[in-house]
Image (cartoon, rainbow, N blue to C red):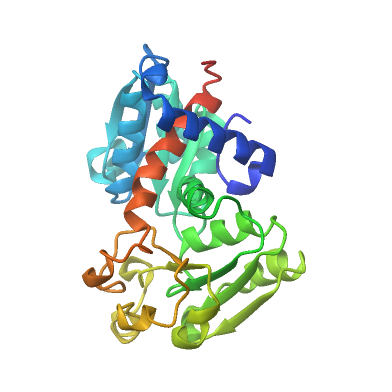
Amino acid sequence: MNNLIDIMQLSTEELQGLINTALDIIADPKKYAHVCEGKKLATLFFEPSTRTRLSFEAAMYELGGHVLGFSEAQSSSAAKGESVADTARTVGCYADIIAMRHPKEGAPLVASRTAGVPVINAGDGGHNHPTQTLADLLTIYREKGGFENLTIGLCGDLKFGRTVHSLISAMSRYKGVRFVLISPEELRVPRYIVTDVLEKGNIPYEETTSLEDAMPRLDILYMTRVQRERFFNEADYLRLKDSYVLTPEKLIPAKATLSVMHPLPRVNEIAVSVDSDPRACYFKQVLNGKYMRMALILKLLEVQV
């Protein structure tokens, strides 16, 4: 594997390998502190990001490498009309590996064809976000001890939520996994996810508009924000943005072992008062994302430790 564009490029064995590396990094960070000396990561972010961009940068620095790049399209030659392919080919002359976020679906794939160095998709429109899924998987693994026999509730914007699409694809490969898809009618999971992943794999799932009805059965509740930047119509965004707000009261019927996850940033879909609940895992996800990005960089650069 030379690039990571879609989480499904990774077999379950490869995912476990990345998890094992991440767990070793957590246990012995000093062992990894200099393994990428002389290597450079370029972060090409054509769309705003806090966690993803900074965690890639932190990951490379903690491996002993260096970082260059830009954090918005206006500070790159894209503002002059340069193509993604040409930008990637140019940056590939300066860096050993590229992490790219772009609002257009497929842009990191285009970049991977010309860059000449490994390209990591750090989010492309409403399509895919494989490294967030790696963060999610390490969180699930550390919280649950594995991936089998879990009931996963996905709540909020399931139509445009690229993290949801990637997580469904990744988790659908494990035995005994069930999905409860909780959303307004207008923001349901795209049909291609239902037909190509869930129905094709005979994965049990249900679609509902009621978070309260689903809550007692869930092992994992994955909340998402309604994303203003994906809407063409401001009125639709305003009508749907507060469809689901998780509060301590709504968690009363939930299992004591529930794990509440969120890719962040949140707006108001999880009340701040939930943060102190021991079931809240979303800031753990942030840290787990750094460790999994470290493991991925090592794999793509073929660094032996």
Locate residue 200: give its quadrant. Answer: bottom right
Q: Residue at x 41, y 32 (%)?
A: 26
Up/down of 59 relative to 46, above or below: above
User: Is residue 94 something one can see in this rendering?
Assistant: no
The N terminus is located in which quarter?
A: top right
Locate residue 125: give its quadrant. Answer: bottom left
* Observer-nearest of 212 and 95: 212
Up/down of 109 relative to 86, above or below: below
Q: Position of residue 82 (x, y in %)?
A: 37, 38
User: Is residue 52 something one can see in this rendering?
Assistant: yes
Q: Where is residue 36 in the image (x, y as percent from the top left)?
A: 41, 17
Q: Which residue is drawn at 61% across and 34% down?
A: 17
In the drawing, does residue 72 fall left or right of residue 21?
left
* Observer-nearest of 226 and 269: 269
Q: Which residue is drawn at 31% across and 25% down?
A: 61
Up/down of 268 relative to 54, above or below: below
Q: Which residue is drawn at 38% across and 78% down?
A: 251
